[in-house]
């Protein structure tokens, strides 16, 4: 099951996080989170629920959290 690991603003930041996690061996999905009547680019970074804790450690070690 996929679980939201991190929420970020902007596609570029989402791509950087996705690349980092992929390099570390995680399966990653990035999906936009659309709010009605907004143009904000909010992105959900998702990983498998079994990998959430390890993936979070990678984000912390790399300054994303």
Image (spheres, grey):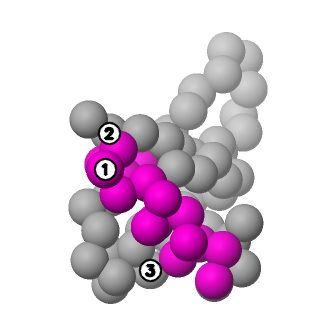
Between circles 3 and 2, the one closer to the viewer is 2
Instruction: Give the labeled residue for mark 1.
Output: 50
Task: State which tag comes first along the sequence, 3 or 2.
Answer: 2
Q: Residue at x 29, y 68 (%)?
A: 26
- Magenta stretch: includes residue 38: no
Q: Which mark is residue 2?
A: 2
Looking at the rendered image, the disc whose residue lies closer to the viewer, 1 or 3, is 1
Q: Quadrant of residue 37?
A: top right
Q: In which quarter of the view is residue 63 placed?
A: bottom right
Discs 2, 1 touching: Cβ within 8 Å: no
Task: Pick the quarter of the image with the C terminus.
Answer: bottom right
Dots 3 and 2: beta carbons under 8 Å?
A: no
Vertical position of residue 36 compared to residue 19: above or below: above
User: What percent of the width, then of the height, locates residue 16?
Assistant: 52, 75
Q: From the viewer's perspective, is the residue at label 2 or at label 1 nearer?
A: 1
Left or right position of 50 against 15 = left
Residue at 40 percent across and 73 percent down: it is 21
Q: CA distance from mark 3 to mark 2?
A: 18 Å
Query: Quadrant where the N terminus lies?
Result: top left
Instruction: Please state which of residues 2 and 18 is positioned toward the viewer in this rendering.
Output: 2
- Estimate how packed mark 2 is, as few (under 14), some (14 to 19) or many (20 or more) residues with alpha carbons within 10 Å: some
x, y (%) of residue 53?
48, 59
State if disc 3 and disc 1 touch (CB < 8 Å): no
Query: Label 3: which residue?
Result: 20
Q: Earlier in the sequence, mark 2 or mark 1?
A: 2
* Residue 41 visible in rendering: yes
Q: Could one spot residue 12 in this view of the protein?
A: no
Q: Which residues are magenta?
A: 46-61
Spatial distance from mark 2 to mark 1, Cα to Cα? 9 Å
Neighbor class of circle 3 (other Cα within 10 Å; few <14, some 14-19, many 20+) is: some
């Amino acid at each position: 099951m996929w679980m939201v690991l991190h929420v970020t603003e902007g596609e570029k930041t989402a791509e950087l996080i996705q690349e980092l996690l992929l390099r570390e061996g995680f399966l990653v999905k990035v999906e936009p989170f659309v709010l009605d009547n907004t143009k904000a680019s909010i992105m959900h970074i998702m990983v498998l629920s079994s990998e959430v804790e390890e993936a979070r450690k990678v984000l912390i070690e790399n300054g994303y959290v």
